[in-house]
Image: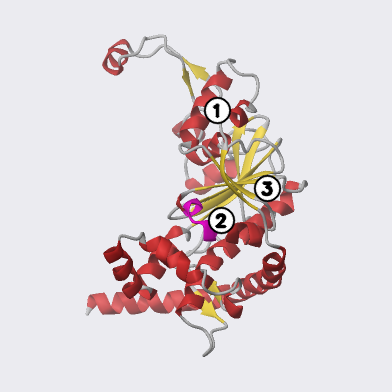
Amino acid sequence: MNLSTFEWDQDALKAAHITKEKLSRLVPTTKVLSGCNEELAQKMGILENTPFVVGASDGVLSNLGVGVIHEGDMAITIGTSGAIRTVAPEPRTDTKERIFCYALTENHWVIGGPVNNGGMVLRWTRDELAESEVKTSNRLGINPYDALTDIANRVDPGANGLLFHPYLAGERAPFWNDNVRGSFIGLTLNHKKEHMIRAALEGVIFNLYMVFSAIQDVMGVPVTSIQATGGFSRSKVWRQMLADIFGHAVTVPESYESSCLGACLLGLYGQGKIDSFDTAKDLMGATYQHVPEPEHQALYNELIPIFSSIASNLEHEYEKLAVFQKRNDHERHSS
């Protein structure tokens, strides 16, 4: 969609070799439809005149469901993958094309970026670096992921200068390059397994911070709140790490199905049953809040630019490695 005309973008249509007649008609997310097919209505057990609100995508609705609805509000989600989003009153784009801009309503535009490498990095770390610890934790009835974060917590923030680029599955934001690769950087004889595990966890957050920096470039206002959701938010270690790296208080909202709640709120708003999305803030509490530890924050402030600079400088070299890996995999499988 062209963010200026709110119509299908002509350049995009041309690139896809289609016309707008081949696509659905664009309407606001708040548009109300009615007049359901009688037979289908009976099968669903609803009245024919039941109103349907068009709605939005799950990520956009998740923002709404955790109360991230004003400039300065920020939502961070880490599950298997991850995303970071904020809201602006008008469309905003990044000249470096690092982040997206989606429509929630004509006055609410969701700006952010998705990342491939979230909890999957923790899973890889569990499987490849902590096999014996996982067996022990399973035998003792301990969650293996809790055991893993406990191991990471044995060493100081910054993992004694060991960095990890978490690009095990290529990466979307901020690179949009499926050929970037993961790597440990700064490894010495003094580093042990726990340093590697902590560096992997920190690497996921460092990469999200790079997306955060891109968002800040177009926000125009300071961050006022950060809401954290997803499986990672169950880990105290990772929550504190997020607060320390981002340098801002992090709250875990008491909203377990945020996309579903967001859909309900958008439906009510579309029908005029609520006047403002601020209602969302009245429907949730907070389960945890973490504030940055000043010493940790200062340390991470040193490491973030190093992480980012090396990631950018190695992007081309990672692409060369990806070409080699793909060719090698093809030759191995064809022999």
Q: Count the marks.
A: 3
Work out how far the residue at label 1 is from the one at label 3, CA to CA, in angstroms.
Answer: 20 Å
Q: Are there few (<14), some (14-19), or many (20+) residues within 10 Å of tag 1?
A: some
Helix, strand or loop at label 1? It is loop
Give the residue type that dot 3 points to: Thr
Say which amino acid is labelled 2.
Arg
The quarter of the image holding the N terminus is: top right
Give the camera-side residue of 329 and 140: 140
Q: Which residue is mark 1?
A: 29
Highlighted range, magenta: 232-239
Q: Residue at x 50, y 31 (%)?
A: 261
Label 1 and label 2: CA atoms lie apart by: 33 Å
* Vertical side of 160 occupied by 89: above or below: above
Question: Mark 3: which secondary structure?
Answer: loop
At mark 2, the secondary structure is helix
- In percent of width and height, residue 47 lies at 36, 9
Residue located beneath label 2 in the image: 239
- Which residue has dot 3 on it? 93
Tag 3: Cα neighbours inside 10 Å, few (<14), some, or many (≥20)? some
